[in-house]
Image (cartoon, rainbow, N blue to C red):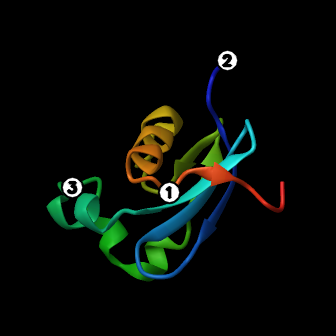
Amino acid sequence: MMIKVAKIKCLGGHRLRATFSGGMAGEYDFSTIVSEGGPMAEPLRDPAFFERVFLEDGAPSWPNGFDAAPGWLRREIEAAGALARDAVA
């Protein structure tokens, strides 16, 4: 089964809460990715731009075309010990 993000929510700064299609959820801080950057990540340094995140085909995406692979995001959250069943799912 392909992992998709079903819901995404900005938590301030460069933190997002992702709820995955299987009902698991967790928070991820994109600060490191944004600071290490490159041309695609640079616009995300602006918190107002970062907050414009939306879901496209189950992947957190931004208006400039930057996106985060849902499977990668889930693995990162799980590796940090922050993956849990979403209480509001």
Q: Which residue is mark 2?
A: 1
Real-space Cα separation, disc 3 to disc 2, in angstroms: 32 Å
Q: Are marks 2 and 1 in contact (CB under 8 Å)?
A: no
- First in sequence: mark 2 vs mark 1: 2
At which x and y percent is residue 84? 63, 52
Q: Residue at x 74, y 55 (%)?
A: 86
State the separation of the CA atoms marked 2 and 1.
21 Å
Identify the residue under disc 1: 82
**Residue 76 image position (x, y, % from top left):** 39, 45
Q: Position of residue 1 (x, y in %)?
A: 67, 17
Q: Mark 3 or 2 closer to N-term? A: 2
Mark sitting earlier along the chain (1/3)? 3
Residue type, label 3: Pro
Farthest top residue?
1
Q: Within 10 Å of the Cα at label 1, are there few (<14), some (14-19), or many (20+) other Cα atoms?
A: few
Secondary structure beneath dot 1 equals: loop
Task: Point out the frontmost of discs 3 and 2.
Answer: 2
77 or 63, which lies in front?
77
Quarter of the rendering occupied by the C terminus: bottom right
For the residue marked with disc 2, what is the amino acid?
A: Met
- Residue highlighted by disc 3: 39
Q: Amino acid at mark 1?
A: Ala
**Badge 3: residue crowd in 10 Å (few <14, some 14–19, many ≥20):** few
Residue 67, horizontal then vertical, whole percent: 45, 46
Q: Quadrant of residue 31?
A: bottom left
Determine the residue positioned at 31% across, 73% down: 45
Mark 1 or 3: the one toward you: 1
